[in-house]
Image (cartoon, grey):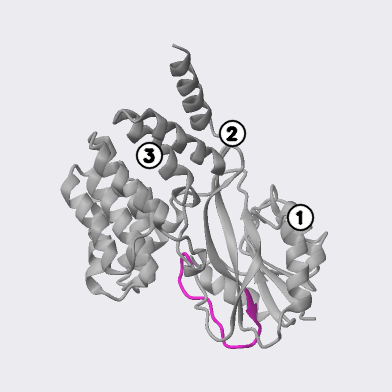
Amino acid sequence: MITVSLCMIVKNEAEVLARCLESAAGLVDEIILVDTGSTDGTKEIAARFTDRIYEFAWEDDFAAARNYAFSLAEMDYCLWLDADDVLLPPDQKLFRTLKETLSPTTSVVMAKYNTGFDDAGNVVFSYYRERLIKNRAGFRWKGAVHEVIEPAGEIVYADFAVTHRKIRASDPDRNLRIYEKLLAQGATLEPRQQFYYGRELFDHGRYAEAQEVFAAFLAEGRGWRENNIDACRLQSLCLERLNQSEKAVSALLQSFVYDRPRAEICCELGRWFFTREDYQTAAYWYTSALLCPRNDKTGAFTLPDCYGFLPCLQLCVCYSRLGDQDRAEHLNELAASFKPDAPEVLHNRAWFENRKSV
């Protein structure tokens, strides 16, 4: 059976650290915690779980801190978690099974990262991340922000997931501040970092700047396929907010250059035509979304609702407005097969029942 070092970097995480470590402590063979300047009770809480606590002077570089944490590991594999991550009980069981069965020739284990949830707790945003990395095999974190280890060698996709559960907002400007500091120092962002810089600008409502970054990123032609596709989607949203609606559609269509359509792109096209009351064309794109296969293992940011629930729900409205109420009702029930208790589904069901009774 393989052995695992949990390697974490933390700062002022007293509110959530115990929850994280309690979920993982029984699964790993050692816990290494690197503190980058806590002033609360973070280190005291960590001491309840491990004596491997180290300090690292923060230098606006997440990769440097993670590489230091990994350098201290003594087990076969390094597992990384953020302090506001947890392994839920079903995932703990799956992790144990993986640990007992994983071939020692495995280089990297990819696991799903669930980071967005609706009011009912359903996952609405997820993607795969490199989660277990073979120790002393030459892997290094790269990127001051949105750091990454590039998977190579023998890669395994695991069944367990890590759940990201924030209880308070972190510094919303930190990542953008680091990027702008790097640029002010004359740094050139490599393609992945350029893509994430655009995302940070978008999240801060700086749409004109974000659109320019995404356009430059795509024009260089050096980006990873999934980032290219998402850049098209985000560039489209920027252009829409800048009142350049036709260019917004062109940006979405450009994503088809990189691979077959994604449901996320088809849903955006459907929404564009829906808001303009072109329900026939909107229905075409929402139907296309239903035909798109979902493959989370591409590493893309996945919006699960786009692969079933959202297209059915929007098709219900489209066909209702086109006068085909029977078809609309059927599609609402298809939406219910994905989310039976969704408020939108229940509202539509009540509307159809009321219509029949009149």
User: Mark 1 falls on what kind of element?
Assistant: helix
Distance from Cα at disc 3 to Cα at disc 2: 18 Å
Residue designated by label 1: 89
Does 129 sit left or right of 185 as displayed?
right
Q: Amino acid at mark 3?
A: Leu
Badge 1 or badge 3: first in the primary sequence: 1
Can you tell which of label 3 and label 2 is closer to the viewer?
3
Badge 3 or badge 2: first in the primary sequence: 3
Q: Give coordinates of residue 137: x percent, y percent.
A: 61, 88
Q: Give coordinates of residue 99: x percent, y percent.
A: 75, 74
Dividing the image into 4 quarters, which one contains the N terminus? bottom right
Residue designated by label 2: 341
236 or 10, nearer to the observer: 236
Residue shown at 64% from the left, 84% from the top: 106
Tell me which corner region of the image, top left, top right, bottom left or bottom right, holds residue 51: bottom right
Residue designated by label 3: 315
